Amino acid sequence: MEPGSQIDINRLPRHVAIIMDGNGRWAKAHGKPRVFGHRNGVKSVREVTEAAAEIGIQYLTLYAFSTENWNRPATEVNALMSLLVQTIRKEIRTLQENQIRLQTIGDCSRLPKKTAAALEEAIEATRHNERMTLILALNYSAKWEITEATRKIAKHIADASMLPEQITEQTIAEHLNTAGIPDPELLIRTSGETRISNFLLWQIAYSELVFTPVMWPDFRRQHFQEALLDYQHRERRFGKTSDQLSSQNV
Ligand code: FPP
């Protein structure tokens, strides 16, 4: 049976986050330069975004460029940045047609001007769309994000607008880039790597983690649906016992 038909649409995660990995290895396996992998990765971005919106996911976060990615050869970094600009410009109409709102997390002030401008334009144009929010993590690192949040909170303490005792988990969540966005219930990483790589460290405290050997350029709608099924087969206990959960009917 097709995985899509087995998914219970009443038990979908509200937010799915994906570490898109394996573009370089996929290209190498095809005897091509790494950039070929990234270009094909865009097809997966398109298909997964469409699949997520169609099934009713509310937030989809894609790790598109980590702070550590600046260490890659300049040619690859430049190619990734132009690919982003091209893709955003090309897809803005599809985002509108599908009522998808674009957002970013990460330090976008350090992105090339052209990339930042294309992103800003797409964010502004799609801001009223309500079907799904597509969040691109760009120049993102969770440790950076938590450090920034700490700085902002420390300023409230320094100017006496907040007391140390008033800091709660919610205060921290509200100062992260993801303020107002529910935590992802599901995190997927492709390419067989089983690391988190500095992604959404605070937000994934209770997320189900799905690791798949599929390389990102090969990741298709069916793989996304399989990950959703995998998620639905797991029991989310939040520290409770199975008995407590069944008596609560959660
Ligand atoms: C990981 O593969 C992939 C990336 C670091 C970049 C992902 C970017 C895209 C799919 C294209 C642009 C994105 C959007 C949202 C339009 P890797 O290069 O780390 O692969 P490897 O681990 O095999 O070397």
Image (spheres, rainbow, N blue to C red):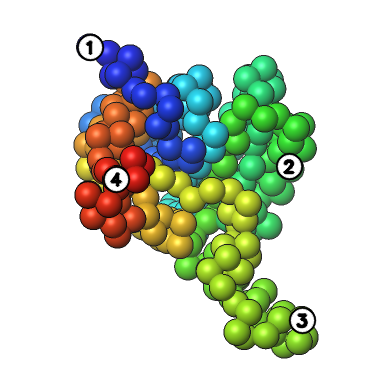
Camera-side residue: 241 or 220?
241
Q: Position of residue 100 (x, y in %)?
A: 63, 28
Q: Compare residues 248 and 39 and report the one nearer the observer.
A: 248
Which residue occupies 42% across, 61% down?
Answer: 201
| Left/right of residue 139 with respect to residue 97 in the rendered view | left
Give x and y (percent) for residue 142.
48, 62
The residue that mark 4 highlights is 247
Measure the alpha-carbon separation of dots 4 and 2.
Answer: 48 Å
Residue 28 locus on image (x, y percent)? 27, 35
At x 62%, y 56%, the residue is: 179
Q: CA distance from mark 2 to mark 3?
A: 32 Å
Q: Which amino acid type is shown beneath numbered disc 2? A: Glu
Outermost residue to the top: 1
Mark 4 residue crowding within 10 angstroms, few (<14) / some (14–19) / many (20+) = few
Q: Which residue is mark 2?
A: 120
Residue 157 vertical position relative to residue 76 in the rendered view, above or below: below
Secondary structure category for the residue under label 4: helix
Label 4 amino acid?
Ser
Circle 1 is placed at which residue position?
1
Distance Cα–Cα, label 4 vs label 3: 44 Å
Circle count: 4
Circle 3: element type: loop
The kind of residue tagged 1 is Met
Residue 60 vs residue 245: left or right?
right
**Of 192 and 26, the residue lying toward us:** 192
Res. 130 in view: yes
Quadrant of image for the N terminus: top left
Vertical comparison of 150 with 22: above or below? below
Q: Which mark is residue 161?
A: 3
